[in-house]
Image (spheres, rainbow, N blue to C red):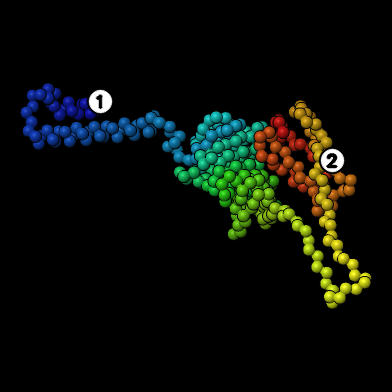
Amino acid sequence: MWMCTMVHKLAGDRPLQQYRLNNVQWKQRARLITGLGTAVMIFILLCTVACGGGGDVSLAKGGINMIVVSGQAKIQSVGGNTSVVEGQEAVITTGDQIMADDEAGVKLLLVDGSLLDLKPDTGLQVVTFSAEGTARLKQLKGRLEVEAASPLLTIEVSTSGSEGFVLKTMQFTATPSVRETAFGIWIDGLNAHLTVEAGEVNVTKDDRTETISTGSKVEASPDELIVSPTEATVGPTEVVVATDDLTPTPTATAAATPTPEPLFPAPGLVGPGDESNFKPSDDILLIWDTPPTPLSEDDWYEVQLWREGDVPYTVAQRTKEGTWKVEPKYYPGRY
């Protein structure tokens, strides 16, 4: 409307055909009208962006695109809190926090193909990201299972708290060094644990970096980083018998290779029975058979629990008892 009014005023409220203009005047008028039209178009575009029209404004926000594979995610950002359910897509940016549903957890698919499985009451925060899909996420609490499609994803673990009236901080980073790497991290107070199910993970704490391979474990505290490597297969031992001379004596006997002490057999689950069902108010007690002799000082049971279709994860890493009570935070579910 504004452009049309200006053109009308240029005509002096008379029909344009009454004017006999030379070539210079026509060019000047054409440039003026073109300039006015450009200004109007810029004004319209600015209004479109400001009003949120003409496209997906979430992309203008910038960030990491993710899809909720299952469960429900709660996203806390500067603009407010939102919930994203299974099948929906969201964009997360620096500073946003992602919280898993307290009952079922949530599985998220990132743009680089990595899968994040946030167990109940687990929280992440976006630290940095890039358009190429590189992301750095901080795990704030809970248990996280990662199926990393590439080394573009870094998980930063950071907790702090008071210990003996002293404020301490535990922090380290985990970055897969090869494609198709699977690992799990869970936080227990000021301590954290990491296990590698497949591939390799570079773990960095302070100025120390360790490459953790499949089957290895990491225990991190504010003061140290303990790596438990994969147990190597022990081969036969060669025994060398030293003698004073090479002349055999009638009393000489052949040295026998010592037989290694056998390991305990894998314990079998005694209860509950397969396909057992429980009410939310029931206590669930896992019971397994134990060897006739007690465990030695350096032997423990490790209890693993997982939902159907998930990667097994450890819930009781060290226990000498033959039972373990399932914690209520794992209700409900099919395990």
| Residue drawn at the location 12% of the way across and 33% of the way down | 26
Quadrant including the N terminus: top left
Q: Residue at x 68, y 33 (%)?
A: 308
Q: Tell me where residue 52 sits by quadrant.
A: top left
Density class for disc 1 (Cα within 10 Å; few <14, some 14-19, many ≥20) is few
Q: Earlier in the sequence, mark 1 or mark 2?
A: 1
What amino acid type is highlighted by mark number 2?
Asp
Which numbered circle lies on residue 235? none
* Quadrant showing the C terminus: top right
Left of 256 or right of it: where is 71? left
- In which quarter of the view is residue 233 placed? bottom right
| Residue 308 falls left or right of residue 252 | left
Identity of the residue drawn at 67% across and 55% down: 225
> How dense is the environment of label 2, judged by Cα within 10 Å: few (below 14), some, or many (20 and up)?
few
Q: Residue furthest bottom?
A: 245
Q: Is residue 323 visible?
A: no
Residue 168 in the image: above or below residue 334: below
Check disc 2 and report the residue beneath it: 289
Q: Looking at the image, which is closer to me, 178 or 73? A: 178
Report the number of discs: 2
Kind of residue at badge 1: Met
Q: Along the horizontal axis of the image, is 164 left or right of 101?
A: right
In terms of secondary structure, where does tag 1 sit?
loop
The answer to the question of whether label 1 and label 2 lie on touching residues, with beta carbons closer than 8 A, is no
On the question of residue 196 being in view, the answer is yes
Q: Secondary structure at mark 2?
A: loop
- Residue 141 place in picture, x, y as percent: 64, 43
Residue at image mark 1 = 1
Examine the rendered structure and indicate whether residue 192 appears above or below residue 19. Answer: below
Q: Position of residue 153 (x, y in %)?
A: 55, 46
Q: On the image, which quarter does residue 272 sit in?
A: top right
Which residue is the extreme one toward the right? 251
